[in-house]
Every structure is written in structure tokens, then in C-alpha cells.
Image (cartoon, rainbow, N blue to C red):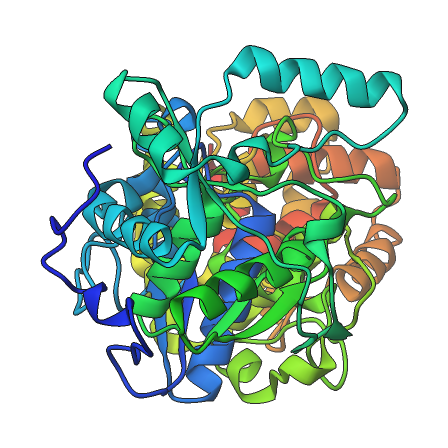
């Protein structure tokens, strides 16, 4: 198994006494996912709460990858997780990519540290080698299930003498290392769930801390890493709450001061079902591709998960940091309503449009999106000019949920200027020229911001001056002049979306065509 001094003796000082953390106790928190796939909303929420806690207390946010189960590691997942944290605006200050004083930040690269830690526990008698075969363990499990009992290891190898262990090792027998659980478990105060105590030795057998392949289990690796990385607070999913007493026993065996623990309630679907990795819409990368803004995801997962004096839509990251209070995190599960994402995005997109600097970025993004969607159809490339694209954003703010909505078929008329023969307008109404002049006069008088409601009323009143053309015929004529299409949004909505100048230009072109 290669146990020994390969780690350079970093842990050796703890064998006979207390080993202090490598840092004093400033706030240092970590997000420690397994790189088994894309980052999903549950993981993002855990990362975000750690980030908010760190920034609230002028601390450090660390990304550590727990990849000790090599059979489940997905190539590229580690890089993808860090990419998505950076995209979301909550980048770690120490990580596999960033490096840092506690490097490496990937558990598969820290095996020497775990081996030395196990050697210390073996020397103390706090751990022992287990030679039970997988067949025997499976038999124990079947017998327990047949007796309607919870399967547990019977601690058989705990009682092997040093001589028996040496004989089995000399014979080349495969083994794992188990931690010797104790009945005396002290209660701990969880930051969210309050006082807890789980006497794990009475309900389960001694846990494996080092597997036969030389890789540690979560129980050992997270304790060793949290200590050596100076982690002051552990905010993790509540599924680990019952294991915390076990981890505290490990801290006691090493004579280390444990961090403070806080366990986050589950994040569930609105109907109370678990978020499933088969749900494509829970992955951060998928939501980013679908046009959702980073701040939308952060706002959404905190809005449903408490931690604040009130729940309101539209918080920025700066506001989240300022208002966050870990003591306000409630114990019940957080229900995530994915259907509300569009409304969250509408609010945050509107805020970006109203910000001059952020609007510049949106203009560039929209220009690229229009080019990609309609590049071959853009006979008149004036629609890509900054002033026009910016006008579209300002006129449509609050009406769209995502920037990509503006390049959907519904809004194709914004970018494709029609070429409509004058004769075609006259086949709809012999009064085409008169209608055009009246509408142009109406648009000239629109000095204030156009609204669909007011413009609809104005068009109704204008039609009363045209005796030979019904209202439906007038709308068909104007829609054709504005978009070149017989169907689409209402004429009033088109005019508002285009703005008076662009709408007037299109009508003039049609009258002259």
C-alpha cells in the first residue's frame, strides 16, 4: 500500500500530540465536488453559499476536486466545473487551475498525504487492516437483509493480533484500512441544524478509510485535506450530517481541531422531487448555452434557499454578499421553480440594458447573434449598426426574457428590411398611399416613447379617416410594409419595436417601391 514517509513528514508531528493547522484561523471555506459530470444547480448553490460566507467574512474561497473514486471521473469534468464557477462570477481564489499555498487541490495528487495519515492512525491503534474478502462482505449484507436488519460490517478484523496481521501481509493478502469507531461521541453544534450527535458505532461497522487500490475514501480524505488546507468552516449538503460525528472522531484521533460545520438543506424541484442529473435543464452549462445570465442562477438558487432577511427577485452578487447571513438558512428543503427562471432573467437583463457599460456588451453580443442567425439574408446591413441595435435593446427591455429572443422568428422583422412592391400594397387597398401618409404623420408626432397600447388606440382613430379600407385591411397593409410578411406580431408592437425612425423609413420605402 506504500504507507510511510513519502509525504515528507508533514503529518508526522501529530503522532504523539497535537498538530496545529498550517494557518491561523481566518475564514477559509471550500467547495469540493467530484468531477463526475457537469456542474448542476445543486452544486452551484453549495459553491455559492461557501463563496458568500467567505466574502462576508473577508475569507478565502477554495475549489478542491475530490476524485478518489477514479471509476466515476469524467474526462474534462474538472475543467468544466472551474469554467462554470468563473462564468457564474464566483471564481475560487485557490484551485487546481489557480494554484495556491495548499496545492495540489486535486485529491488524486495527494495520495502520499493520505498514506502517511493512515500510518499515523495504525500506529496509534485508531485504525487497522481488514482482510475480509468481497465475498464475505456480500454474504454479511445478504444475511442482514434476510433478517430485516441494516447491513453493517461486523468488525471481525479489528481483533486480529499484530502477528496475524503480519502473517497475512507477508502472504500478500489484499487488505483495506478501517477506522476504529468509538462509542463516546461528543455532540456538535451545526451552524444550521443546531446541536447534533450520532453514535455511529452503534448503527454501523468500522468504515473503510483506505481502499485496497491505495485511494482514500471520502471520510479520510476530506478530514486530512480540510485540516491541511486550514479550512475553518465546512458548508456542505445535509446528506453528510449523519457522518459528521464519524469525522469528528477522526479529528480526535489525529488530535486536530475540527472546523465548524454547517449542513445545507436539499435543493428539490418545485413538486418536492429530487433534482436529477437526467434533467438537462439543471446543468449550469446548459442554462448558460440557453441564454440565462450568471446572476440569474445565483439569484434563483438563493431566492428559494433562504439565508436572507427577505426573499426578493433581482439581487446582484454584491447585494447577496452584503445581505447573506448563514444563521438565516432554514432547515427545510429549498424548492426550486425552474419555470421562474425566465422572469428572473427578464429582470436581470433589463438591469443590464439600463447600465451603460453592460449595455455595450449586450450590443456586441446581439450584433454577433444577428450575424449568425440572419447573415445571409441581411441585404441591408445598417441593421447591425450600433445605434440601431442599441435602440432595439432599449425599446424591448422588459419585454424579452433572453437576449436570444431578439433573433427568434418572432423578431425577424427587426433585422430583415422588406422590399415590397408598391403595386402589392395597392392590391390590398387602393388607399395605400393615403394610409401611408397618415401613419407617417402619426409617427412624426410620437416624440415620447411609444407604447403598444397607446399606438393601437391611435391607429384605431386613424382608420376612421379612411372610409374604403377596414381596420383589418389597414393592419395587413402596414404589416406587409413593415415586415414583408402577411402574419406576425401586431402592427403596434412592430412599430414600438422598430422605433418611429425605422418604422417611418420602412413605410416610405414601401410607398416608393
Q: Nearer the viewer, residue 310 or 192?
A: 192
Q: Does any portion of residue 210 appear in the rendered image?
A: yes
- The image quadrant that residue 137 belongs to is top right
Q: Does any portion of residue 399 appear in the rendered image?
A: no
Question: In the picture provided, is 163 more to the left or to the right than 187?
Answer: left
**Image quarter in which the N terminus is found:** top left
- Which residue sits at x=40%, y=83%? 27
- The image quadrant that residue 355 belongs to is bottom left
- Which residue sits at x=53%, y=35%? 412
- Percent x, y of residue 333: 80, 58
**Relative to residue 94, is residue 32 depicted above or below?**
above
- Which residue sits at x=59%, y=32%? 156
**Relative to residue 512, is residue 143 depicted above or below?**
above
Question: In the picture provided, is 363 more to the left or to the right than 115?
Answer: right
**Relative to residue 292, is residue 386 depicted above or below?**
below
- Percent x, y of residue 437: 63, 52
- Which residue sits at x=53%, y=50%? 180
Q: How many marks?
A: 0
- Percent x, y of residue 413: 54, 38
Q: Nearer the viewer, residue 234 or 281?
A: 234
Q: Residue furthest top?
A: 135
- Percent x, y of residue 39: 47, 43
Question: In the picture provided, is 79 more to the left or to the right than 50?
Answer: left
Amino acid at each position: 500500500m506504500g504507507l510511510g514517509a513519502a509525504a515528507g513528514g508533514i503529518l508526522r508531528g501529530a503522532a504523539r500530540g497535537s498538530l496545529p493547522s498550517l494557518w491561523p484561523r481566518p475564514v477559509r471555506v471550500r467547495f469540493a465536488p467530484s468531477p463526475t459530470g457537469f456542474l448542476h444547480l445543486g452544486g452551484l448553490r453549495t459553491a455559492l453559499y461557501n463563496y458568500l460566507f467567505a466574502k462576508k467574512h473577508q475569507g478565502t474561497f477554495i475549489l478542491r476536486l475530490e476524485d478518489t473514486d477514479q471509476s466515476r471521473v469524467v474526462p474534462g469534468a474538472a475543467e468544466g466545473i472551474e469554467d462554470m464557477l468563473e462564468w457564474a462570477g464566483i471564481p475560487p481564489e485557490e484551485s487546481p487551475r489557480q494554484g495556491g499555498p495548499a496545492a495540489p487541490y486535486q485529491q488524486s495528487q495527494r495520495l502520499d498525504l493520505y498514506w502517511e495519515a493512515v500510518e499515523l492512525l495504525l500506529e496509534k491503534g485508531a485504525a487497522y487492516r481488514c482482510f475480509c474478502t468481497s465475498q464475505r462482505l456480500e454474504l454479511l449484507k445478504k444475511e442482514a437483509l434476510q433478517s430485516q436488519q441494516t447491513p453493517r460490517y461486523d468488525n471481525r478484523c479489528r481483533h486480529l493480533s499484530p502477528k496475524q496481521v503480519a502473517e497475512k501481509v507477508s502472504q500478500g493478502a489484499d487488505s483495506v484500512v478501517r477506522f476504529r469507531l468509538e462509542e463516546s461521541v461528543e455532540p456538535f453544534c451545526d451552524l444550521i441544524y443546531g446541536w447534533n450527535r450520532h453514535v455511529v458505532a452503534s448503527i454501523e461497522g468500522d468504515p473503510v478509510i483506505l481502499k485496497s487500490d491505495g485511494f482514500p475514501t471520502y471520510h479520510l480524505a476530506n478530514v486530512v485535506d480540510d485540516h491541511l488546507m486550514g479550512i475553518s468552516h465546512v458548508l456542505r449538503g445535509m446528506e453528510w450530517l449523519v457522518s459528521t460525528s464519524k469525522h469528528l472522531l477522526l479529528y480526535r484521533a489525529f488530535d486536530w481541531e475540527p472546523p465548524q460545520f454547517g449542513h445545507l438543506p436539499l435543493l428539490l424541484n418545485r413538486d418536492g422531487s429530487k433534482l436529477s442529473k437526467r434533467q438537462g435543464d439543471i446543468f449550469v452549462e446548459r442554462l448558460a448555452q440557453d441564454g440565462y445570465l450568471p446572476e440569474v442562477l445565483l439569484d434563483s438558487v438563493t431566492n428559494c434557499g433562504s439565508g436572507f432577511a427577505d426573499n426578493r427577485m433581482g439581487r446582484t452578487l454584491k447585494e447577496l454578499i452584503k445581505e447573506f447571513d448563514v444563521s438565516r438558512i432554514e432547515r427545510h428543503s429549498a424548492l426550486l421553480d425552474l419555470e421562474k427562471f425566465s422572469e428572473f432573467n427578464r429582470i436581470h437583463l433589463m438591469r443590464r440594458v439600463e447600465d451603460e457599460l453592460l449595455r455595450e456588451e449586450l450590443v456586441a453580443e446581439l450584433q454577433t447573434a444577428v450575424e449568425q442567425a440572419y447573415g445571409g439574408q441581411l441585404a441591408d446591413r445598417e441593421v447591425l449598426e450600433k445605434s440601431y441595435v442599441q435602440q432595439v435593446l432599449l425599446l424591448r427591455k422588459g419585454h424579452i426574457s433572453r437576449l436570444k429572443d431578439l433573433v427568434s422568428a418572432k423578431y425577424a422583422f427587426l433585422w430583415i428590411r422588406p422590399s415590397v412592391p408598391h403595386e402589392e400594397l395597392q392590391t390590398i387597398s387602393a388607399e395605400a398611399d393615403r394610409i401611408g401618409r397618415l401613419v407617417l404623420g402619426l409617427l412624426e408626432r410620437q416624440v415620447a416613447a411609444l407604447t403598444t397600447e397607446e399606438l393601437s388606440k391611435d391607429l384605431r382613430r386613424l382608420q376612421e379617416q379612411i372610409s374604403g379600407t377596414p381596420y383589418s385591411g389597414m393592419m395587413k397593409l402596414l404589416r406587409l410594409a413593415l415586415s414583408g410578411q402577411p402574419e406576425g406580431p401586431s402592427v403596434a408592437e412592430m412599430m414600438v419595436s422598430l422605433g418611429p425612425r425605422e418604422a417611418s423609413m420602412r413605410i416610405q420605402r414601401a410607398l416608393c417601391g
